[in-house]
């Protein structure tokens, strides 16, 4: 990894490894759905998957990880 520049790092919610933010795919909540934040400018909490984990992100195992990261304690039941 390149040193000397301070890349913001984020953790992949599935494998738990850290990557520079721009190498990760960002997911955000849209109401009660999880969507890919392609513009990378949605506000609010984001969750990240690395490129290795991104394929088949809609599998229930990965969705569950994303859900936990995105909802944490603030799950709404309304
Ligand atoms: Zn990963």
Image (spheres, grey):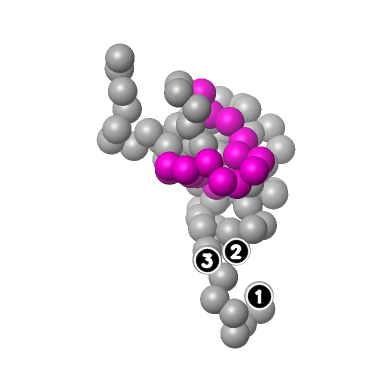
Q: Is mark 3 within 8 Å of ligand 1?
A: no
When the figure is inspected, residue 76 is found, relative to residue 45, above or below; the finding is above
Q: Nearer the viewer, mark 1 or mark 2?
A: 2
Q: Residue at x 28, y 35 (%)?
A: 73
Query: Which mark is drawn over residue 8?
Result: 3
Q: Residue at x 66, y 78 (%)?
A: 2
Specify which label sits upstream in the sequence, 3 or 1: 1
Query: Which mark is drawn over residue 31?
Result: none
Q: In the rendered view, does 61 fall on the left or right side of 51?
A: left
Q: Can you give x and y, in whole percent of width and height, for residue 24 in the image?
A: 63, 52
Q: Secondary structure at mark 1?
A: loop
Q: Are marks 3 and 1 in contact (CB under 8 Å)?
A: no
Q: In the rendered view, does 60 fall on the left or right side of 38?
A: left
Q: Can you give x and y, in whole percent of width and height, for residue 3 in the image?
A: 61, 82
When the figure is inspected, residue 21 is found, relative to residue 48, above or below; the finding is below
Residue ID for mark 1: 1
Q: In the rendered view, does 75 fall on the left or right side of 24?
A: left
Instruction: For the C terminus, give its image quadrant.
Output: top left
What is the C-alpha distance between the residues marked 3 and 2? Answer: 6 Å
Q: Are marks 1 and 2 in contact (CB under 8 Å)?
A: yes
């Amino acid at each position: 990894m390149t040193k000397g520049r301070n890349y913001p790092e984020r953790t992949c919610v599935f494998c738990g490894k850290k990557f520079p933010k721009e190498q990760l795919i960002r997911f955000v909540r849209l109401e009660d759905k999880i969507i890919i934040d392609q513009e990378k400018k949605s506000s609010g909490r984001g969750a990240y998957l690395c490129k290795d984990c991104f394929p088949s992100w809609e599998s229930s195992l990965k969705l569950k990880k994303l859900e936990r990261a995105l909802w944490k304690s603030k799950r709404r039941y309304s």
